[in-house]
Image: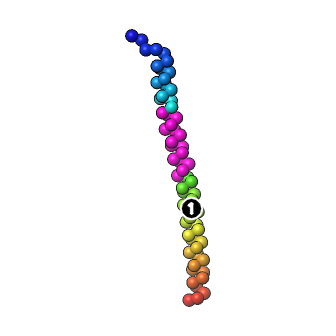
Amino acid sequence: MTIPIWIYAVVAGIVISALMAIKTGREERQVEMESIEREGEIYIKRLEREKEKREELRAPGE
């Protein structure tokens, strides 16, 4: 009993599709993490600026 060639092609297509999905998922997660890190850095810088402004306003009044 032989297996038709098209079944091998279908199995190969499924395997390739799975590998590409895994690769794409990893890339998307990496891009998302980089974006989150940039947003976090921006947020921290903004908090530091606000803290400096509050300290400047508080210092002359003391």
Q: Quadrant of the N terminus?
A: top left
Q: Residue at x 58, y 68 (%)?
A: 46
Q: Which residue is mark 1?
A: 41
The magenta segment = 18-33
Percent across and percent down for residue 15 are 47, 29
Quarter assignment of residue 35? bottom right
Percent across and percent down for residue 39 are 57, 59
Q: Farthest residue to the top: give it.
A: 1
Q: Residue at x 46, y 24 (%)?
A: 11
Q: Magenta: predominant secondary structure element?
A: helix
How many numbered dots are placed on residues in this image? 1
Quarter assignment of residue 50? bottom right
Percent across and percent down for residue 48 are 57, 71
Q: How many residues crowd around disc 1 within 10 Å: few (fewer than 14), some, or many (20 or more)?
A: few
Q: Quadrant of the C terminus?
A: bottom right
Report helix, strand or loop for mark 1: helix
Q: Residue at x 56, y 75 (%)?
A: 51
As for residue 13 lying within the magenta part, the answer is no
* Amino acid type of the residue that numbered disc 1 sits on in the rendered structure: Glu
> With respect to residue 31, does 50 lie above or below?
below
> With respect to residue 40, does 54 lie above or below?
below
As for residue 19 lying within the magenta part, the answer is yes
Q: Nearer the viewer, residue 55 or 11?
A: 11
State how the image is colored. Answer: rainbow
Q: Farthest residue to the bottom: give it.
A: 62
Q: Residue at x 56, y 64 (%)?
A: 43
